[in-house]
Structure formats: structure tokens, C-alpha cells
Image (tube, helix red, strand yellow):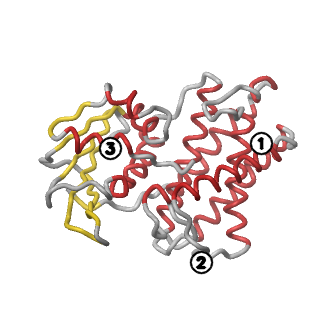
Amino acid sequence: MNPVEPVDTVELFLPLSRKLIAVLKALPPDGWARPTICAPWSVKDVAAHLLGGNLGRLKDRDEKSSPSEDPILDYDELVSLINRHNAAWVQAARRISRELLVEFLDLSDRQVVRYFKSLAPDAPAPITVGWAGSDLPPNWFDIAREYTEKWLHQQHIREALGLPVLTERKWLYPVLDTFLRGLPHAYRSVEAENGASITVQITGPAGGAWTLVREGRFANRPYWRLYAGDSQAACRVQIDQDLAWRLFTKGVSPEAAKGQVHIDGNAALGEQVLEMVSIMA
């Protein structure tokens, strides 16, 4: 095992954007109205949500945002705030024509990538990644989280239109690698003997193995550290790659996933993996 390393996703944004723009440009008018899993949002609404994310990032750039000094909201308050902002933006964006929406996405995607490339990867990001903890993360992790958001919502659009999802290793492995960074936070209240470990193996061409190890206590809580690779763990959890990304983004419930996940060893310890959520809203 080795300590997990930064996930470098910056060079994936523009190729991923081109995939989405090609889909949207080919859509007939009725395709834009197709319902998605992000109910009650349509394909157009999800595309508008992605545009809203870009505009938020560019606002940070133009207003020279620094790490926030606002009062820290708890997780539920933050999710509620995000949901309200998302709903208000999507409602307003319904006035944007389909053609302009595609142009705005294309333009803003390219500007966001330029902005991300200007940031020092290890400098603190201006916002937290709430599903991985309350501390400000380095920019590379915030950028990787943004990549997972763009990848995920493109898959929602693709599935609504009956198109293949982008699960080649190039696209999906960085998503899974980023999602698994939420494991220490998911286990923050799970007690186990010091040195106990859980290996999560994602099976499939885009998969890999990550191992979580209990290493004492921090701030009066169990401290778990994530490593890349396999080990002789007390518990091993095997999840298919397609199920994994859906499970960690609330597309499949833990109860529905349980029968499709293979756990060797301490089942009670391993089942906590099924409760991990790697999105905010």
C-alpha cells in the first residue's frame, strides 16, 4: 500500500466538455425535455445546472475569492442551501434558449479550465468538500470534485437520452478515485481496534483498490487513513464499478446495493462503505 496521491483531472475537463457539447448540439427539440434521474429536472435543466456551476467558479475567479471566513454551516444546512440555490438558478435558466445554453456552456467550460490551470494545486481551496470533511481542501481536490460533478451530470443526460455512459477507465477511474477520498469521513465515528483495515475493491476496467486503516484517535474520534492499494485487511468489500458510482451518488440505495456487494470478513465494518455519499445534493 502507498498513501493516496492527488487526483489530476484538469486535462480531462475540455475533452469531457466536447463530449457533452456534441450530444447537446445533436438533440432534437423534444430531447431537451426528456426527464432525468435528477427529478424534476429535464435534460435542459441539468445542462443549465452545469452552466450555473461554471458561472459560480468564474465569479470566484473574477472576485478573487479566498478561503471562506463565513460561519461554517453543518452538513444538513449546507445541503439545504445548495438545493435552494440550484433550484432558483435552474428555474431562471429556463428562459435561456437551447442554442445559447450550448454556446454559454462551451465558452464557460473553456474559461473554467483556464482558471483551474492558474491555481496552485496544493493551495487551499475557497470552499470545503463537505462529504469528505469540514476542513478546506487543496485546490486539486476541489477541482477533482468539480470533475466528478461534470462527469456525473453528463451521465444523467446520456441515460435520459438512451446514450452510452462514459465508463472507460480514462473517464471513470478519476471519478472513483475522488469519490473514495470520502471514506475516512464516512468512518469518522466507526470504532475498531487500532490497525484494523478495510479494503474496497472496485471491479471492472475502471476499478482499483483502496484500503482504509484505523490509526489511533484525533479530536476525540477514531482516525482512519486512506491508502492506495490492497492489503491483508480484516474486511474486504468488492463492488462493481457501475454499481459503485451510482451507490456513492445516491442513484442506488444502500439497501438495494447490499445484495450486489460482496463482503469478506467483518460484515458490520464493511457495510459502512455502503453508507458513503460522495456528492453534496
Q: Nearer the viewer, residue 83 or 126?
A: 83
The mark that comes first in sequence, 1 or 2, is 2
- Nearest-to-viewer mark from 3 and 1: 3
Quarter the N terminus occupies: bottom left
Task: Tell me the tag on residue 102.
Answer: 1
Label disc, if present, on residue 116 of the rendered structure? none
Which numbered disc, 1 or 2, marks the residue closer to the eye?
A: 2
Amino acid at dot 3 = Val
Image coords of residue 10 (percent x, y): 53, 57
Q: Amino acid at mark 2?
A: Glu
Secondary structure beneath disc 2? loop
Q: Position of residue 69 (x, y in %)?
A: 59, 77
120 relative to 157 in the view: left or right: left
Residue at numbered disc 3: 273
Give the x, y percent position of residue 135: 45, 69
Comes first in the chain, label 2 or label 3: 2
| Tag 1–tag 2 contact (CB < 8 Å) | no
First in sequence: mark 3 or mark 1? 1
Neighbour class for label 2 at 10 Å: few (<14), some, many (≥20)? few
